[in-house]
Image (tube, helix red, strand yellow):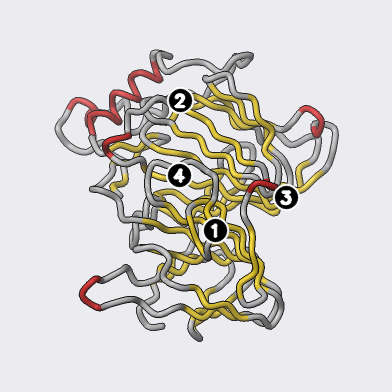
Amino acid sequence: MSDLLTLHPHAKDLGGGFQVRRVLPAAQRRAVGPFVFFDHFGPATETPEDQHDVRPHPHIGLATVTYLFEGAMMHRDSLGTEQEIRPGAINWMTAGRGIVHSERKPEALKTETYVNHGLQLWCALPREHEEVEPSFSHTAAADIPATEVEGVPVRVLVGEAFGLRSPVPTLMPTLYLDIALPAGGAFSLPPLAPQMAVYAVDGDVMLDGEPLPQHTMGVLPDEDAAAGERPAVRITADGARRLVVVGGAPLDGPRFMSWNFVSSRRERILQAGADWEAQRMGHVPGETEFIPLPDHPFKTQSQTSAAEPEGNSKA
């Protein structure tokens, strides 16, 4: 398909040598539906010596979506939530007006060697809900609806597809699927949302005969009411492949992004930075560490000017 937009990831070190592949935001495309951030980590072998814990840090104006293929993480937040994240579950944290959380190695695994592999995504909240009260929702793997389409296993992680509805609560139309394409299999992906993208998790696939390499995202053409309904996209591969599909309704306006903050208002981003620096955004019970506010862009001249904070991205 000649109008497929292919997004390649760039490597990002989150600290301690913990590398992720970041696909969104990208220069060519800032968002797909409400998804403004897409990180893929692993498969990575964790040993007792590794220090890959993510210390407490803040968020506003977004929902984090964590999904593991392998491994485990311990989520704690300023609401008092303590939830071990395991493969197949969806953990949806609505930051709203502000939340603080940490992600650490579970106590039971601190002396073990294991593999961590998963995705962490952000969804920008609708403008009318950007300042809602923060909340956390855990949906166990057994509660995620699943089916087979053309003999291909599909899990509906978030949203609605193929007659199934995920119980994950959202504030905007959102689509998130996990598809396990068997070796030599084929799958027709219908137009399930106005904006959609396919990510190749563990190997190359073909979209309508066009290659989509491993660890890349293929953004499908957006819905065009004037052009009528879009055709289904045929997905094929020689070997067994895992794919995820993300999408939903377009954002209700541009978003500013800086560090861990997303907002439709530039000044709100700067206010969140000042609040975190003053430790006014809450605390995770039992935690004494935290990630300091970065100097750039929050402590630069741009903070007092009318210009967009340096280093921000706008979705």
Vertically, is 285 above or below 255? above
**Which residue is drawn at the image coordinates 70% and 42% (left, top)?**
86
Of labels 4 and 2, earlier in sequence is 2
Q: What residue does disc 4 label?
A: 122
Instruction: Point out the frontmost of discs 1 and 3.
Output: 1
* Residue 62 visible in the displayed image: yes
Residue 18's quadrant in the figure?
A: top right
Q: Which amino acid does label 4 sit on?
A: Trp
Judge by depth and name the residue closer to the eye, 8 or 15.
8
Q: Residue furthest bottom?
A: 209
Q: Element at badge 2? A: strand
Q: What residue does disc 2 label?
A: 99
Of labels 4 and 3, earlier in sequence is 3
- Mark 4 neighbour class, 10 Å CA radius: few under 14, some 14 to 19, many 20 or more: many
Question: Quick check: 247 left or right of 213?
Answer: left
Q: Which amino acid does label 2 sit on?
A: Ile
Judge by depth and name the residue closer to the eye, 36 or 181.
181
Q: Which mark is residue 70?
A: 3
- The CA span between labels 4 and 1 is 23 Å
- The CA span between labels 1 and 3 is 24 Å
**Which residue is drawn at the image coordinates 66% and 52% (left, top)?**
42
Of labels 1 and 2, earlier in sequence is 2
Where is residue 284 drawn, in percent x and y?
Answer: 56, 18
Instruction: Point out the frontmost of discs 4 and 1.
Output: 1
